[in-house]
Structure formats: structure tokens, C-alpha cells
Image (tube, grey):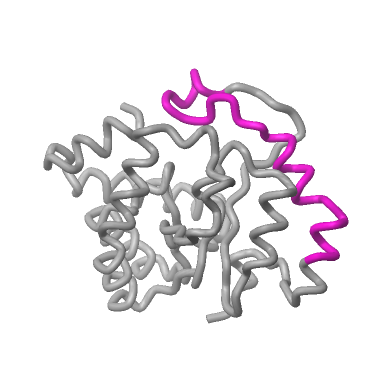
Amino acid sequence: MNHKDFLLRLWVGKINLDEVENEFEAQIRRILDYNLSVSHLDTHQHLHIHPGILRIVIKLAKRFNIRWIRYPLEINPNYGEFYSPFLRLDTFAKFSFGLINRSKIENIFSLSGVSRPDYLFGMYHAGSMNYAIFKKMLLQIRPGLTEIIFHPATKNEDFSEEFPGSFRGFDWVSQFNALISPMAKELAASNNVNFISFKDATL
């Protein structure tokens, strides 16, 4: 089952949320069994944009004392000219669902006691992030914690068979080059932007 099928079944009530919770908890425990720390929680294709999944993610974050959860909403009307060519109809429908339910999602977060970034960039640019887009994002970062989503690699490969419905035609190398660009580092410094990871973030 790919993420599109999962969401469709979830929206019509054909997904057992207890099974989702058990699977997610098993994955967390597997990481901890290797003595690795968990800096934050998120889901493949941002499926916790659905309030039912989000409540499970928050419940597990609190159970395992995980401080951060990805905030699965990107709201920036100035990015229209940069929308990813990989933004398929089903992906657009998922993002639209998140925006429609924005107030509910924010309310769940606010009552949870679990932290989230203030802003998120990159959901609309999956597969096509490059320096030009990264530069535009850096120039628009506001005070607070912003997560920027990248899919970097040193070689362009097609993983669509391993992950049906995902990653077809992604430009992994351009994303890698954008991240290591000296110009991006200089631009960030000149705009008082500091690069950190979730484990370094303070509440």
C-alpha cells in the first residue's frame, strides 16, 4: 500500500489506528534498541498531517520523551513560481487537506505539550530543491525555528520501484549541492540564520 492508498483508506475510516500506533511504537523501540537517540518524529510523506495520525505521533512522543515533531504545513504564498514539477495531484490534495485543517492541526499541537518548529519550508519543492529556491527561503526566514526539508544525495537514482508513488525523477544532486554551497552559508550568516539540527534545538 502506498501513501496515497493509505490516506484514502484513512479518510474513509478503513485504517485501524491501533495498528498504526503499534507499528510506530515498534519502530521507535527498534531505534532505541540500538542505543540511538530520537531527536524528533515525523512520518513518510507527512502522513501525520491527518489529525488522527498526529494524535498518535504526539502520544508516542510524550511516552518516549521525544521533544520535537515535524510541523507538516508550509504556508507561504510567495513561492508560487517555485512549486515543484513533482507536485502530483494526489500530493497537492494531501497538502490542501492540511491547509483546510490548519486550525485543527495547530490546536492539537498547542494542547499537546510537545514542541514543533515555528515554520517549515520545502514540502512544495520535494525533488526539485536547488540553490535558487534555497536562497529565496533563506531570505524569508523569520525569527524562530524553521525546518527546511531536503532530499540530498551525491548521485541521482530512481527509487520509485522501491517506494511506489514516491521519489520518481528526484534531483538529489542539486539538493546536495545547494546544501554545501558556500554562497548559501554566506547568505545565511549575513541574515543571522544559524543551521542546527533537531537535537540542538532549544525549547
- Residue displayed at 53% across by 30% down: 167
Tell which residue pokes out farthest to the top in this image. Answer: 161
Q: Indicate left or right for 173 with 114 as reference.
A: right
Magenta segment includes 179: yes
Quarter of the image holding residue 188? bottom right
Q: Which residues are magenta?
A: 159-187
Of residues 66 and 9, which is closer to you in this image? 9
- Residue displayed at 62% across by 47% down: 150
- Residue displayed at 41% across by 48% down: 46
Q: Indicate left or right for 60 with 44 as reference.
A: left
Of residues 2 and 104, which is closer to you in this image? 104
Q: Considering only vertical position in the picture, is 155 above or below 184?
A: above
The x, y position of residue 3, in whole percent, is 35, 35
Quadrant occupied by the N terminus:
top left
The x, y position of residue 122, in whole percent, is 56, 51
Magenta segment includes 120: no
Q: Considering only vertical position in the picture, is 8 above or below 201?
A: above
Tell which residue pokes out farthest to the left in this image. Answer: 13
